[in-house]
Image (spheres, grey):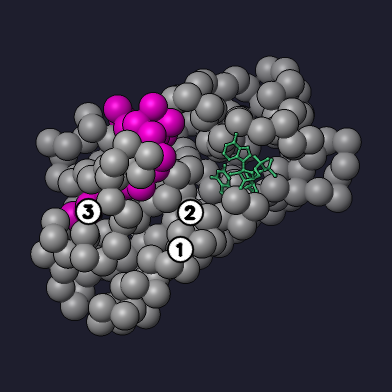
């Protein structure tokens, strides 16, 4: 399987305020699982790589990463100025933040901000391949206008996906075990997937464990860098 490769930047789409998806050619033989990440190398400093979970799912024709563009970091400026056709270097796929076997039990996806990227991949893949994936997405974000994939997920509401949005700068409470428990029927077999900034993950995972969720039922995707 490919681990270190060059590929072509194709194009980008703004998906909500401050947030852009970048599409790259998917090399032949590149295989990945929803939830895995790639590393993208900064062109002028090949020693510096940034990890990005693929927001695309394996059945899609491109590799897509989705990120916040609200800063002027060297890396984000470079991303902004990519020209279609330009070659970039990636490694991957990496990581084990993937769906557990036996997805007939409820999967509870907990996303903080841009941490929603792996869940787009997992949920869209399940729907695309008609896999049974009873799932609930709880997405905590500051504002509705900066919430990635909101319209795309809302279109899936009649396909078995439950959606809960908590906009913390618009008066919503913080995401917690108590909130999840008030909305979903949590059982011993429910699986929890948490993705976002390290502080979001640590706080929520501690809260779940303090409320009796077994650690083995929790998987995390920690976006260090945020
Ligand atoms: C396994 C893994 C997967 C990852 N997947 C993703 C992914 O799918 N998408 C993604 O975006 N990142 C992802 N990251 C993080 C990514 O690699 C970068 O670290 C991140 O995008 C920050 O990039 P940057 O250094 O350009 O920082 P910046 O974009 O400059 O951000 C640095 C810090 O400043 C804050 N900040 C800067 N400007 C503002 C502002 N105006 N308002 C509020 N806060 C601000 C940011 O929130 C952050 O805390 C992942 C990390 C890991 C380890």
Crowding at dot 1, Cα within 10 Å, few <14 / some 14-19 / many 20+, comes out as many
Q: Which sits earlier in the primary sequence, circle 3 or circle 1?
A: 3
Q: Position of residue 9 (x, y in %)?
A: 67, 26
Crowding at dot 2, Cα within 10 Å, few <14 / some 14-19 / many 20+, comes out as many
Q: Which residue is mark 3?
A: 135
The answer to whether the residue labelled 1 contacts the one labelled 2, judged by CB atoms less than 8 Å apart, is yes
**Disc 1 secondary structure class:** helix
- Asked whether the viewer can see residue 193, the reply is yes
Q: Height in image: 62 above or below 120? A: above
The residues tagged by marks 2 and 3 sit, at their Cα atoms, a distance apart of 18 Å
**Disc 2 secondary structure class:** strand
The quarter in which the N terminus is drawn is bottom right
Q: Residue at x 28, y 35 (%)?
A: 153
Q: Residue at x 51, y 21 (%)?
A: 13
Q: Residue at x 86, y 44 (%)?
A: 46
The residues tagged by marks 3 and 1 sit, at their Cα atoms, a distance apart of 19 Å
């Amino acid at each position: 399987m490919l681990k270190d490769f060059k590929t072509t930047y194709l194009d980008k789409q703004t998906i909500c305020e401050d947030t852009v998806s970048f599409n790259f050619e998917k090399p032949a033989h590149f295989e990945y699982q929803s939830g895995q990440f790639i590393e993208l190398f900064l062109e002028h400093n090949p020693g510096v790589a940034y990890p990005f979970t693929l927001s695309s799912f394996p059945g899609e024709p491109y590799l897509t990463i989705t990120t916040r563009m609200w800063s002027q970091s060297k890396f984000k400026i470079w991303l902004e100025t990519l020209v279609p056709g330009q070659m970039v270097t990636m490694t991957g796929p990496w990581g084990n933040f993937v769906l557990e076997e036996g997805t007939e039990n409820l999967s509870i996806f907990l996303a903080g901000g841009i941490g929603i990227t792996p869940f787009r991949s997992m949920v869209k893949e399940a729907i695309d391949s008609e896999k049974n994936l009873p799932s609930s997405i709880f997405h905590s974000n500051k504002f509705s206008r900066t919430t990635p994939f909101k319209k795309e997920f809302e279109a899936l509401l009649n396909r078995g996906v439950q959606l809960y949005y908590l906009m913390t700068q618009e008066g919503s409470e913080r995401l917690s075990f108590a909130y999840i428990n008030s909305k979903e029927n949590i059982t011993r077999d429910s699986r929890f997937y948490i993705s976002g900034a390290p502080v979001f993950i640590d706080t929520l995972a501690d809260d779940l464990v303090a409320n009796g969720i077994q650690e083995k039922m929790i998987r995390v995707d920690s976006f260090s860098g945020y």
